[in-house]
Image: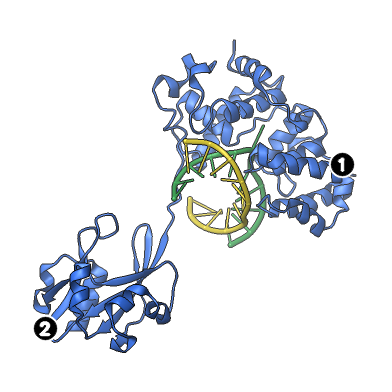
Chain colours: A blue, B yellow, C green
DNA sequence: AACCCGGGGAG
DNA sequence: CTCCCAGGGTT
């Protein structure tokens, strides 16, 4: 039995009964596919039913206003999908004589329809032999064949598409595609796949090598966190207060200055209303000078720092916060981040 | 190739 | 919290 035959056998026994599967109507299939882009079936289903009821054909959709479409789209997210649908409905109405295309080559020209959606609509509505590759298919292929190429890399997209093309049952493309997607959604799930009852268990690379949790591989888009600091230079003629940093944050174990952090860029008034500030200092008149904002770039964080100069030792605060009172001359005995050390060096010299 | 677009559910 | 979802468009 071929992969596709076994897959389709599984599909016929396990598939969900979904309304867009009971039709060859390309318009309704298009409607469902756009709604389901990056959207779970359970979330999209009620929207599909409302849209199909309000706009039963492409003509009625094309004649709707953008406000009407977006109103019905409300809460689904990715609202450009709704705007693109209206644009495409008008194109179908005007340039395809109101007949929704079923050929991949026509579909791919329409706004909001990419490779996946064009393959889905053409294969579901007219059985055209185009393989779909969505998030489910990436997962199934990566695990079954042990493909570790990142699915969101350019080469990975080509590689997975080629494998899917090769796997496709060209005589039954629509059902094969549905089966791939359904298998990924119900059986070969992202977390806790049902391997114990999987029909592909014995030939699945990931199962045999215990790699289901490592596949597929996806490049992480490193997200850069922004942090905003006020560092306090609390000093007298000879001494200054420093602080050892926590072990579970940047600059673990190094020394910096007493500080207050914000998640957004704020003015000094936010510092003055900060409970710590008011605990440490009597009032804002202790501030003699505040530096310009200094930007400091780390691999996954962007720091924005301002240095606040204060000549006022609150001994009680020193003890409570574990601050260290050291000689300015001894500053270089303490490991400090470049951001802090450079500023102090320039200031003290 | 990187970034943007969203709400929601699962773990 | 993070990850992911029947992805596509723009820069």
Asked which secondary structure carries label 2, the reply is: loop
Q: Earlier in the sequence, mark 1 or mark 2?
A: 1
* Residue A296 in which image quadrant: bottom left
Q: Residue furthest top?
A: A1
| Element assignment for label 1 | loop
Instruction: Read off the residue under disc 2.
Output: A238
| Residue that appears at 39% across and 81% down | A268
- Which is more toward the observer, A346 or A268? A268
Which label sits on residue A270? none
User: Label 2: how many residues lie within 10 Å, few (<14), some (14-19) or many (20+)?
Assistant: few
User: For this view, does A218 lie left or right of residue A297?
Assistant: right
Q: Is residue A208 visible?
A: yes
Height in image: A165 above or below A328?
Answer: above
Image spot of residue A63 (x, y percent): 88, 53
Which residue does the numbered mark 1 point to in the structure image? A56
Q: Is residue A74 left or right of residue A286?
A: right
Say which of A102 and A74 sits in front.
A74
């Amino acid at each position: 039995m071929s992969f596709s035959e076994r897959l389709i056998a599984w599909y016929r026994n396990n598939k969900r009964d979904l309304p867009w599967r009971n039709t060859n109507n390309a318009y309704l299939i298009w409607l469902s596919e756009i709604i389901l882009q990056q959207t779970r079936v359970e979330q999209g289903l009620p929207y599909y039913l409302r849209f199909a009821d309000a706009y039963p054909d492409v003509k009625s959709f094309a004649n709707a206003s953008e406000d009407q479409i977006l109103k019905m789209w409300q809460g689904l997210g990715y609202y450009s999908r709704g705007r693109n649908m209206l644009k495409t409905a008008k194109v179908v109405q005007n340039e395809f004589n109101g007949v929704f295309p079923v050929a991949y080559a026509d579909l791919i020209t329409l706004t909001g329809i990419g490779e996946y959606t064009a393959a889905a609509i053409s294969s579901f509505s007219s059985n055209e032999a185009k393989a779909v590759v969505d998030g489910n298919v990436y997962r199934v292929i990566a695990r079954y064949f042990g493909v570790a190429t990142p699915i969101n890399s350019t080469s990975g997209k080509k590689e997975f598409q080629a494998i899917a093309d090769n796997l496709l049952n060209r005589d039954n493309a629509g059902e094969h595609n549905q089966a791939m997607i359904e298998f990924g959604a119900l059986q070969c799930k992202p977390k806790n796949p049902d391997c114990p009852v999987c029909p592909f268990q014995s030939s699945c690379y990931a199962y045999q090598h215990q790699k289901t949790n490592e596949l597929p591989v996806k490049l992480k888009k490193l997200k850069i966190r922004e942090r905003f600091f006020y560092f306090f230079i609390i000093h007298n003629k000879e001494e200054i207060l420093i602080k050892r940093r926590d072990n579970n944050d940047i600059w673990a174990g190094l020394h910096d200055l007493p500080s207050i952090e914000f998640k957004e860029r704020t003015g000094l008034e936010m510092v003055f209303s900060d409970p710590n500030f008011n605990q440490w200092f009597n009032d804002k008149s202790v501030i003699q000078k505040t530096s310009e904002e200094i930007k400091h770039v780390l691999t996954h964080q962007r720091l924005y720092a301002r240095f606040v100069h204060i000549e006022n030792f609150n001994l009680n605060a020193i003890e409570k916060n574990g601050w260290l009172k050291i000689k300015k001359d001894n500053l270089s005995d303490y490991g400090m981040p470049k951001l802090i050390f450079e500023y102090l060096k320039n200031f003290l010299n």
